[in-house]
Every structure is written in structure tokens, then in C-alpha cells.
């Protein structure tokens, strides 16, 4: 939880996005998200977009 709080403050993320992102760092596959812009702020996180951006 401390890492999520630090990430939230350091990367200017909402705490809920930081918690989800930090948890996803431990997942070898990454995170499957529709809105990827905020999660791009988390270094090392593999983001798998649900849809291609236009």
C-alpha cells in the first residue's frame, strides 16, 4: 500500500489507479485496460489496451 501511495503522489495519479497499477506490476501478463493514459505513468507496467486508439 505504501508503494501505491508514493506512486499516487509522485506520478500525480488517483489513488485507486495507483493501487490497481502497483498490483498489476506483480502480474506477468500486465493489465488489460480501456483507458490507458494514466497507467502509462507507472514505470515497468505492461499495459494491454482493450481497443486501438484512433
Image (tube, rainbow, N blue to C red):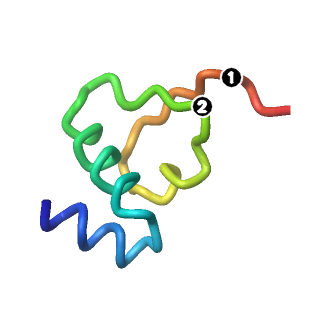
Residue sitting nearer the eye, 25 or 4: 4
For label 2, the SS is: loop
For label 1, the SS is: loop
In percent of width and height, residue 24 lies at 29, 37
The image quadrant where one finds the N terminus is: bottom left
Residue 34: numbered disc: 2
Check whether the beta carbons of the residues at disc 1 and disc 2 lie within 8 A of each other. yes
Residue at screen point 34% across, 62% down? 15
Residue 16: numbered disc: none
Mark 1–mark 2 Cα distance, whole angstroms, equals: 6 Å
Residue 51: numbered disc: 1
User: Crowding near pointer 1: few (<14 within 10 Å), some, many (20+)?
Assistant: few
Q: Is residue 13 left or right of residue 27?
A: right
Q: Is residue 37 above or below residue 52?
A: below
User: Crowding near pointer 2: few (<14 within 10 Å), some, many (20+)?
Assistant: few
Q: Is residue 32 left or right of residue 16?
A: right
The image quadrant where one finds the C terminus is: top right
Residue at screen point 25% across, 73% down? 6
Amino acid at each position: 500500500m505504501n508503494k501505491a501511495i508514493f506512486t499516487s503522489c509522485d506520478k500525480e495519479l488517483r489513488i485507486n489507479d495507483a493501487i490497481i497499477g502497483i498490483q498489476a506490476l506483480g502480474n506477468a501478463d500486465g493489465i488489460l485496460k480501456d483507458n490507458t493514459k494514466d497507467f502509462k505513468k507507472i514505470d515497468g507496467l505492461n499495459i494491454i489496451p482493450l481497443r486501438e486508439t484512433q
